[in-house]
């Protein structure tokens, strides 16, 4: 099989850099274009000194001769370009939020602007392979979910599908600082964040509608969800702790999770609450199922830059182009 000619748009952000490093290991990929406004014209080694990649950054993707575009642009920046990439015959694996939500009316509320191409939303496959592998394999356009929504949906999907959620759901989520992106700012300044934990987006985080959308697909209607994210002073990792009144027994709940994830290569049910460090630097999501006084307590841990972004993008690419789903994503369990 000839390597797939790939472009990465926005290759100098944290998700983009992680993606390039993974794709460089993929025997079925030829990295032929990397774009970056801030690195345009500079050699790839300016951003990737340890990768043996020859070439210079472009400031825009040239879709001619490219088979797949990985979009790692800021939210809103790729939506206007996607139609041109599709017309040129490219498939798209998009890591921004531009195509995750099927309802275009949600974009002004959560992202502050109308969607540039609402006609494309209906054909975008939601890039969560545990739920949508068949759709991803056929789609021209794949929308990789957000890091928080990946963790929360994987923590709740088996219970929602089995009808075991008997109440409102509380999702308490904590993320490393890299989830805020690479651009510097006061909110991610070392002196502001070190030795401190803070909750944010109390009125509603933009990953919340993704969680609602996917749980509604599984259960017919989404439960009411209270989702509060927290920023913790570590580089990477997400831990979601989800609480809901349990329908049935704890044994039934655990059996539902074991069955749901039995054949999944990257999502694994574990016996004890997983620390984030056990999930980082790999494309894994670790889920633990327990209960307290009739209330389910489900935790999920993953790496926000890998399973929560770039690694899941590669997983979707593998499905879309007929590769083994684990290609370029096999990694040892790092501890400590």
Image (cartoon, helix red, strand yellow):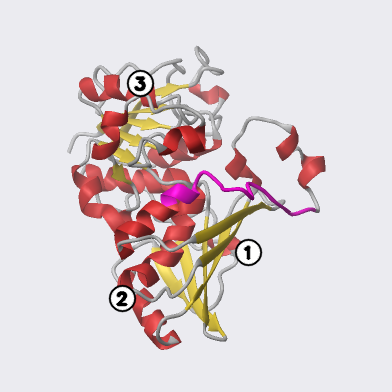
In what element is the residue under mark 2? Answer: helix
Q: Is residue 205 magenta?
A: yes
Question: Depth check: 208 or 288 in front?
Answer: 208
Q: Residue at the location (23% across, 35% down)?
A: 140
The residue nearer to you, when weighing 112 against 173, is 112
100 or 69, nearer to the observer = 100
What residue is rendered at 27% in x and 32% in y?
120
In the picture of the structure, the residue carrying the numbered disc 3 is: 81
Q: Which residues are magenta?
A: 196-210
| Mark 3 vs 1: CB contact within 8 A | no
Q: CA distance from mark 2 to mark 3?
A: 40 Å
Task: Give the residue at mark 2.
Answer: 259
Could you say where residue 154 lies in the image, as x and y percent from the top left? 42, 62
Tell whether 183 sits left or right of 262. right
Circle 2 crowding by C-alpha within 10 Å: few under 14, some 14–19, many from 20: few
User: Residue 315, can we see it?
Assistant: yes
Q: Nearer the viewer, mark 3 or mark 1?
A: 3
Whole-percent x, y for residue 318 in the image:
28, 46
Chain-order first, disc 3 or disc 1:
3
Question: Quick one: quadrant of the N terminus?
Answer: top left
Q: Mark 1 highlights which residue?
A: 336
Q: Name the spot of residue 207 as percent of width and height, x first.
A: 49, 47
In magenta stretch: residue 117: no
* Viewer-side residue, 295 vs 287: 295
Query: Is the magenta region chiefly helix, strand or loop?
Result: loop
Tell me how far mark 3 sits from mark 1, CA to CA. Answer: 42 Å
Residue located 22% across and 42% down the image: 321
- Graded by Cα atoms within 10 Å as few (under 14), some (14 to 19) or many (20 or more), the crowding at tag 3 reads some
- First reached walking from the N terminus: tag 1 or tag 2: 2
Q: Is any atom of residue 306 visible in this view?
A: no
The answer for how far apart the CA atoms under marks 1 and 2 are is 30 Å
Q: Image quadrant of residue 331?
A: bottom left
């Amino acid at each position: 099989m000839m390597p797939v000619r790939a472009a990465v748009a926005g290759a100098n952000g944290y998700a983009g850099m992680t993606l390039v490093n993974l794709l460089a290991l993929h025997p079925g990929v030829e990295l032929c274009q990397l774009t970056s406004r801030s690195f345009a014209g500079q050699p790839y080694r300016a951003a990737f000194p340890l990768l043996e990649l020859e070439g210079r950054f472009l400031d825009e993707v040239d879709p001619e001769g490219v088979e797949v575009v990985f979009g790692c642009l800021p939210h809103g920046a790729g939506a206007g370009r996607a139609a041109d990439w599709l017309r040129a015959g490219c498939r798209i694996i998009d890591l921004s939020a531009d195509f995750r939500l099927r309802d275009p009316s949600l974009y002004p509320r959560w992202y502050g602007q109308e969607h540039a191409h609402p006609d494309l939303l209906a054909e975008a496959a939601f890039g969560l392979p545990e739920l949508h592998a068949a759709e991803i394999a056929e789609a021209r356009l794949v929308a990789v979910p957000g890091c928080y929504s990946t963790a929360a949906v994987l923590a709740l999907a088996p219970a929602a599908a089995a009808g075991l959620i008997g109440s409102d759901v509380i999702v308490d989520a904590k993320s490393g600082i890299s989830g805020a992106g690479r651009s510097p700012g006061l909110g991610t300044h070392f002196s502001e964040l070190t030795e401190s934990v803070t909750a944010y987006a109390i009125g509603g985080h933009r990953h919340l509608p993704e969680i609602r959308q996917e749980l509604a697909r599984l259960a017919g209607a989404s439960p009411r969800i209270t989702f509060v994210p927290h920023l913790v002073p570590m580089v990477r990792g997400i831990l979601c702790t989800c609480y809901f009144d349990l329908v049935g027994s704890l044994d039934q709940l655990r059996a539902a999770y074991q069955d749901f994830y039995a054949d999944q290569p990257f999502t694994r049910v574990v016996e004890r609450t997983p620390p984030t460090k056990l999930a980082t630097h790999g494309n894994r999501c670790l889920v633990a199922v327990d209960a307290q006084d009739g209330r389910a307590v489900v935790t999920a841990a993953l790496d926000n830059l890998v399973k929560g972004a770039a690694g899941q993008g590669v997983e979707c690419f593998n499905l879309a182009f007929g590769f083994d789903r684990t290609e370029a994503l096999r990694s040892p369990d790092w501890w400590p």
